[in-house]
Amino acid sequence: MVLCCAVYAQNATIVSEMIESPAVTVHQVAYLLSVYTGVADESASMEEALAASIESGLCRNSAQGDSAVDYSTLAGICMRAFGFKGGLMYTLTHADRYALRELQAMGLLASTVVPQSKVDGFSALLLINDCLAAAEAK
């Protein structure tokens, strides 16, 4: 499978490191999605991308750059990055746990995913790529 849609313009080193990562970090996800959404430039550092992501609302204010990302957090970031509307509970709360349920309902995440489990880099890129495809299909 080729993961080219969401990562075509990003720094190849960062994407390679992300693919090989056993637990993707907030820095990696923030960089990838902030560049994709245009809130940060491709030449931005990881810290600059995270700051831009927090300022734009992609990441929560409490986001710690070197922290491992769990499925719930990644789902929340993806919902905001791709502009998915969500159902009633997500619309009311914008909570990451409801974002996870929305992505499961959309068929983008398996229903067996444990919300607090850490996401490896390859799985994170697969989810981001699937979200991109779903967003473009709408």
Image: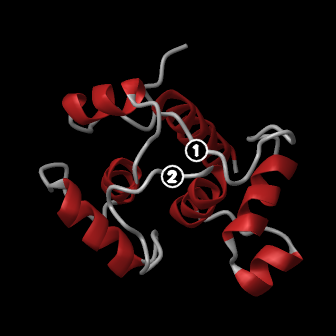
Q: Residues within 10 Å of mark 1 (few under 14, many from 20)?
A: many
* Residue 47 point in image, percent of width and height: 20, 62
Quarter of the image holding residue 75?
A: bottom right
Locate residue 7: give its quadrant: top left
Side of 35 relative to 77 (left or right): left
Between 6 and 122, the one lying in front of the other is 122
Residue visible at 51% across and 52% down?
A: 69
Which circle marks residue 118 in the picture?
A: 1
User: What's under tag 2, amino acid-wise?
Assistant: Val
Nearest to N terminus: mark 2 or mark 1: 2
Q: Are marks 2 and 1 in contact (CB under 8 Å)?
A: yes
Which colour assignment does the render follow?
secondary structure
As drawn, 55 above or below 122? below
Mark carried by residue 69 = 2
**x and y percentages locating residue 123 in the rendered image:** 57, 32
Residue 15: x percent and y percent?
31, 32
Question: Residue extending furthest bottom?
Answer: 92
* Element on which disc 2 rests: loop
Can you name the residue that lies furthest to the top here? 1
Q: Of helix, strand and loop, which one carries label 1?
A: loop
Amino acid at dot 1: Lys
Q: Is residue 95 left or right of residue 104?
A: left
Taking depth in this image into account, of 2 and 16 the one nearest to the observer is 16
At a point 67% along the width and 44% down the height, the residue shown is 134
| Disc 2 from disc 1: Cα separation | 6 Å
- Residue at image coords 81%, 37%: 110
Q: Position of residue 117 (x, y in %)?
A: 65, 46
**Residue at image coords 62%, 62%:** 79
